[in-house]
Image (spheres, rainbow, N blue to C red):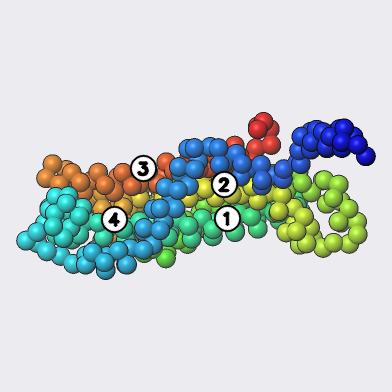
Amino acid sequence: MSTEDRAAVAKLKREGEAEYTPSLTMWQRALRRIRHDRPTVFSLFTLLALAIISFAAPNISAAFQIDPYTQDLRNNYAGIFTEGHPLGTDELGRDHLSRLLFGGQIALGIAFTAAFLSLGIGVAVGLFAGYFGGKLDDLIIWFIITLNAIPALFLLILISALLSPGPGALVFIFGFLGWTGTTRLVRSEAYSIKEQEYVIAARAIGASNLRIMFVHILPNMISLLIVDLSLSLGSLILAESTLSFLGFGIRAPIPTWGNMLNGALDYTRRAPHLIFLPGFLITLTVFCFYLMGDGLRDAFDPKIAD
């Protein structure tokens, strides 16, 4: 083969490679969209940083030799950058930085645990309702409509007032009351997916109902469930903070961002940092969860062009 022929063959190969672009999977396409979505990337890194700092609260407190429960009435209302107290102290002289860290640990711990609990309940109930339909589906939808007819905040306040819950009890309250939205989402998707050809084929070759639901139907909902989970986390952070702020959630001396706001209301002028810092952390965390959920929804949306 002559030199000209080799050059022509090489040119054809280069042109063919340029024209050939391998198709991306849903997850690869979503990851590429997320990398180019600055608000979503900002939210992810901010939430990751908050989670790491909050769950490392015992180590940070030990390093700075500060404690969220130790009182020092001779040094109360200390301002920011006070020696030994980087973010000041509260009305009882307790270190504000350590209380913010431990408050974040409790808030994020409750939110993540309750979100996964409600997600598990919602997925299981929604799959059974959407796959089997009939009277079971009617009964579940009736129960969901009845439960959703009760204002969520009033129901949470009523239960919290009766039980005086700690962090563990709040997890179960949020988990067992927050599954209805996930159930409706999963149910509607199961209704649609169960009529697909591959599900009908699996049923025809003798696959059990449980296998069809959890192997053939559920994996096709993962992207929707990720978005639903991220939005639920923001709502749970806000719900816990609201209950604690109103005095029906986690009670002092256990620190949470909500009850820290409640305790600082009488000291607005004397120590404004006691209100600003927990309020800012609540706002930032909820905002980032909602922003991340919105970005994930767009990333997994097949109708949006790249």
Q: Amino acid at mark 4?
A: Leu
Q: Is residue 235 left or right of residue 216?
A: left
Give the vertical position of 53 relative to 67 (above or below). Answer: above
Work out whether mark 2 precedes mark 1 in sequence or the reverse, and give the earlier one. Answer: 1
Instruction: Locate the C terminus and report the quarter of the image it occupies.
Output: top right
Residue at left offset 30%, top offset 63%: 60
Which residue bears the numbered disc 4?
100
The Cα–Cα distance between marks 1 and 3, rounded to whole angstroms, is: 24 Å
Which residue bears the numbered disc 3?
283
Work out whether mark 1 precedes mark 4 in sequence or the reverse, and give the earlier one. Answer: 4
Work out whether mark 2 precedes mark 3 in sequence or the reverse, and give the earlier one. Answer: 2
Q: Amino acid at mark 2?
A: Asp
Crowdedness of circle 2 by 10 Å Cα count: few (<14), some, many (20+)? Answer: many
Residue at left offset 53%, top offset 42%: 293
Q: Which mark, by number, is residue 273? A: none
Which residue bears the numbered disc 1?
119
Q: Is residue 247 left or right of residue 267?
A: right
Q: Position of residue 9 (x, y in %)?
A: 87, 36
Crowdedness of circle 4 by 10 Å Cα count: few (<14), some, many (20+)? Answer: many
User: Element at badge 4?
Assistant: helix
Q: Position of residue 269 (x, y in %)?
A: 13, 41
Q: Which mark, by number, is residue 228? A: 2
